[in-house]
Amino acid sequence: MKTEILEIYIQSVLPMKIEIAEKIASKFDRFELSKNEFILQENSISEDTYFLESGFVRSYTFDNNGNEVTTNIFSAPCFVNDFLSFFTQKPVKENYQTLSNCIFWKTNLENVQYNFHNIPEFREFSRLLFIINYYKLHDRMLEMVKETATSRYTKLLEKHPNIFQNASLKIIASYLGITDSSLSRIRKEISKI
Amino acid sequence: MKTEILEIYIQSVLPMKIEIAEKIASKFDRFELSKNEFILQENSISEDTYFLESGFVRSYTFDNNGNEVTTNIFSAPCFVNDFLSFFTQKPVKENYQTLSNCIFWKTNLENVQYNFHNIPEFREFSRLLFIINYYKLHDRMLEMVKETATSRYTKLLEKHPNIFQNASLKIIASYLGITDSSLSRIRKEISKI
DNA sequence: AAAACTTCTTGTCATTTGACAAGAAATTAA
DNA sequence: TTAATTTCTTGTCAAATGACAAGAAGTTTT
């Protein structure tokens, strides 16, 4: 199975010699999951780091009333990681579940550590990947503070329309920080225009 | 001027040989700012990375109505960084302002790059620092989604009571994602109990 | 096809929060 | 000390959102 898409993704984060991207990608193993399966569950420890080649994944936890709260929605191609658990080997606090059939590539901490300390390009790549993820989260947090629920919804619709084919409105509502009935009303309002 | 506090902080993130922590710290230069000065302003480029030895700093931007929104409050000892700008040399999107007199230590990208590629402990340290910051942000975002404004307020009061001596309620309100009048009402409610 | 289940929408009402304005309290400047 | 400025509180009213329940629409199972 070819690691081509992974290599292209690596190059899109940090351009480097093809041979190096190939070397990094060569340590990854391919696997598939069908819809509604888990890659990581609460309280387990993340043994691997995952690249999502195709499909959709979400992470979720529970609020104080036991309702699911979707914390992130991943749309391929991207890395799906629980950084804290993977690098510190502490338990995962969320559940990572596929929203569709998915193709993944995984590699373990040993491989990552070897590359991190032996391939300068990989170090730079990892750092950039962190930064990208950090700023996605930062933007999302800012959106929660600055924007109305309506504007958060329309922005998601613009940026990731394909998510709506794979996640229920309940999941999307909890990702936006509102209830499903509020989202339903917002959609009704918008459709009037 | 002694880098002792910086060394202790580095060791608290990742324990390492004293000589290595000293070597890392030796590349930092001390400076002071008084209250209400800026370390980074919108649209500038972050030339340095900063360690806050004592004092309080906040970062802020503006919402669609031109109101200040406090995005983060930093309480020494900690690093104060705009990762995106510092590592990619793109413009800063927020303002970083002191809330009190502060003692900082700074070092530039060249030094960081040298250490990152030549001191394995520094690489591990940087990665952990990223992870810590990522999860602080993650927790804050989750709080915005899961908790009520009242509970966000009481949690901040418990965790960082000293922030209240250095930031106005307007600043704290915008950090909590509410208006200052709402915060005032929440405080009134709580004081009744 | 019928039954069971899930998802989505809608109604009602309560609660939270915001917008705006006025005044009190505290801080800073003259 | 007085004046000016900023910060904080409070009142009023409107808007956004949640909680809960019922029903419609769509899917899956039998």
Image (cartoon, coloured by chain):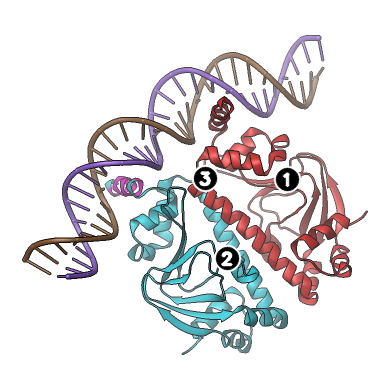
Chain colours: A cyan, B red, C brown, D purple
Amino acid type, callout 1: Val
Q: Circle 1 is placed at which residue position? A: B57
Neighbour class for label 1 at 10 Å: few (<14), some, many (≥20)?
many
Q: In percent of the image, x 80 and y 74: which residue is there?
A: B119
Residue range (magenta): A182-191
Horizontal side of A131 relative to B39 (left or right) equals left
Q: Position of residue A29 (x, y in %)?
A: 51, 85
Q: Nearer the viewer, mark 2 or mark 1?
A: 2
Q: Chain of mark 3?
A: A
> How packed is label 2: few (under 14 Cα within 10 Å), some, or many (20 or more)?
some
Residue A185: in magenta span: yes
Task: Kindly report the distance in space between the C-alpha atoms of the residues bearing marks 3 and 1.
Answer: 21 Å
Nearest the eye: C10 or B70 = C10
Is residue D14 rendered to the left or right of residue A64? left
Q: Which residue is mark 3?
A: A146
For label 2, the residue is: A91
- Could you tell me how far apart the alpha carbons at marks 2 and 1 are, in whole angstroms? 32 Å
Residue visible at 85% across and 47% down in the picture: B32
Residue A14 horizontal/vertical position (percent): 62, 75
Q: Identify residue type, mark 3.
A: Lys
Instruction: Name the side, left or right, on which B11 lies relative to A138.
Output: right
Which element type, helix, strand or loop, lies under badge 1? strand
**Res B113 visible:** no
- Which residue sits at x=66%, y=57%? B91
Helix, strand or loop for disc 3 = helix
Chain of the residue that carries numbered disc 1 in the rendered image: B
